[in-house]
Amino acid sequence: MKHFAKNKWVVILVGVLLGANCSCGKTPEGYKEVYSAPTKPERLARFEKLPMQDQVNVYVYAVSHREPPDTTLVQAFVDQRSEAVPAIVMRIELDDNERTKVLLLEALESASLAGVKIGEESVTINRLRSVSERIKDKDLQSRAQKSLQTIGRLAESSR
């Protein structure tokens, strides 16, 4: 009986640890609905109907888990810039995952290249720069800084 109780706790501990790690790869709300659309325009239309936070979650999942990564959803962020940019910036600041931060910075870079003014306020650029400086992984930090340079350059040229 003692042996069973000991194994039970091992099984529970392993379950808790696996459960904690599985939430990262959990399919976000709305993902299946968006990707069940047969065409890209229909996919984009379904994506744009999601609440903004769900859009950010679906985007991160799509660029992290699809091969090739699906960055076409950035168009929705371009179309919904006034709501999208603050939501993405907030997610970048709050998310613990460095890769997610970089993927979202790259989404802002793409949106910026498409004409979205992200860095109109230097405060936004400074907030993003502060986040990128705290990224520990050197490759990810380099990608983040590249995206910020592009965003900053485009902001400067539009003034």
Image: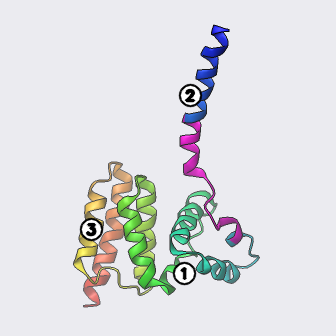
Q: CA distance from mark 3 to mark 2?
A: 38 Å
Identity, as a three-letter code, of the amino acid under mark 1: Ala
Quadrant in which residue 65 is drawn = bottom right
The residue most toward the bottom is 159
Label 2 is placed on what type of residue? Leu
Q: Nearer the viewer, mark 3 or mark 2?
A: 2
Q: Are marks 3 and 2 in contact (CB under 8 Å)?
A: no
Magenta part of the protein: which range?
17-33
Q: Secondary structure at mark 3?
A: helix
Q: Tell me which residue sits at (45%, 78%) in the image.
A: 84
Residue to which mark 3 is pinned: 127
Q: For this view, does 82 lie left or right of residue 14? A: left
Q: Is residue 145 above or below residue 22?
A: below
User: Going from the N terminus, do you reach mark 1 or mark 3 first?
Assistant: 1
The image position of residue 57, as x and y in percent, is 54, 64
Does label 3 or label 2 sit earlier along the sequence? 2
Residue identified by numbered label 1? 76
